[in-house]
């Protein structure tokens, strides 16, 4: 997976450089290439976080099921928080450069934002690559302690805890429903803003119902969370 993320981030970097060159030459493909590059960079960052969440869930289940050292969870958190910060910073910087460029800010400002976003993207890619290496070592350490009945050839460390149930999404819990409503409420305005600004370069009438729905979902989430 590290190679996949590195390849995707490298291609995105090449796309960002080519986009900047086309922008400086006033090339017609500047917008199209920039949009494709931003989508690719988003895909790389989202894939990194999605794979991390899946691996993190599996590691937590093994720590709980086989009563392993809880310091494994601490190591997992030490990887998660820096990676999340790197992904968010890189994604938001690229999004800001793309949206403001589509709106029509001065060329020098768009170029400065694009250059800053490119530097952040490179730094985030290097950071994520190193964190993925730490995650691989953590997986190996946990796998070495899994009983031999689970992984042939591995030394047995202990028996599984009777009655252990892996993490599941419990939709009957108010806090789970609240987080879902809040996440949807936050995502809708961002998607609508991207569509309106890139497609029409203005905030049209679509923004009004989307904002109302988002506020409604956010309020519903807050009310559900308050009933716990």
Image (cartoon, grey):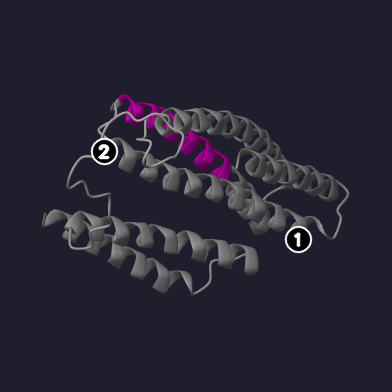
- 87 or 34, which is in the foreground? 87
Residue 104 visible in the snapshot: no
Q: Position of residue 138 (x, y in %)?
A: 45, 29
Q: Note whether 227 is above or below 49 in the view shown.
A: below
> Bounds of the magenta span?
71-92
Judging from the image, what secondary structure is the residue with disc 2 in?
helix
Q: Is residue 33 left or right of residue 123?
A: right
| Location of the N terminus (image quadrant) | top right
- Image quarter of residue 58: top left
In this rendering, the count of numbered labels is: 2
Write the residue at 36% across / 41% down: 149
Q: Position of residue 25 (x, y in %)?
A: 88, 49
Q: Which mark is residue 64?
A: 2
Q: Which mark is residue 32?
A: 1
- Image quarter of residue 61: top left
Badge 2 vs badge 1, beta-carbon distance below 8 Å:
no
Q: Earlier in the sequence, mark 2 or mark 1?
A: 1
Reply yes or no: does residue 84 show up in magenta.
yes
Q: Position of residue 48 (x, y in %)?
A: 54, 45
Write the residue at 39% across / 66% down: 211
Judging from the image, what secondary structure is the residue with disc 1 in?
helix
Q: Is residue 167 left or right of residue 123?
A: left
- Image quarter of residue 189: bottom left
Q: Note whether 189 is above or below 60 in the view shown.
A: below
Magenta highlight: main SS: helix
Kindly report the distance in space between the C-alpha atoms of the residues bearing marks 2 and 1. Answer: 48 Å
Q: Label 1 neighbourhood size at 10 Å, few (<14), some (14-19), many (20+)? A: few
- 112 or 157, which is in the foreground? 157
Reply yes or no: does residue 169 show up in magenta.
no
Q: Which mark is residue 70?
A: none
- 170 or 100, which is in the foreground? 170
Q: Label 2 neighbourhood size at 10 Å, few (<14), some (14-19), many (20+)? A: some
């Amino acid at each position: 997976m590290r190679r996949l993320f590195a390849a995707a981030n490298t291609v995105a970097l090449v796309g960002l450089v080519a986009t900047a060159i086309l922008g400086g030459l006033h090339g017609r493909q500047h917008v199209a290439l920039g949009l494709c590059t931003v989508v690719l960079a988003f895909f790389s960052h989202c894939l990194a976080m999605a794979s991390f969440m899946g691996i993190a869930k599996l590691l937590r289940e093994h720590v709980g099921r086989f009563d392993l050292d809880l310091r494994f969870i601490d190591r997992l958190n030490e990887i998660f928080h820096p990676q999340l910060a790197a992904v968010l910073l890189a994604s938001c910087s690229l999004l800001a450069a793309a949206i403001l460029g589509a709106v029509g800010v001065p060329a020098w400002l768009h170029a400065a934002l694009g250059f800053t976003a490119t530097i952040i993207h490179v730094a985030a890619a290097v950071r994520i690559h190193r964190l993925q290496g730490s995650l691989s070592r953590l997986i190996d350490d946990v796998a070495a302690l899994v009983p031999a009945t689970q992984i042939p050839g591995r030394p047995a460390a202990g028996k599984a805890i009777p009655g252990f149930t892996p993490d599941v999404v419990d939709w009957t819990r108010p806090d789970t429903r609240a987080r879902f409503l809040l996440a949807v409420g936050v995502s809708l305005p961002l998607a609508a803003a991207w569509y309106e600004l890139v497609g029409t370069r203005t905030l049209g009438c679509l923004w009004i119902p989307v904002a109302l729905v988002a506020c409604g979902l956010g309020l519903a989430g807050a009310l559900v969370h308050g009933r716990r």
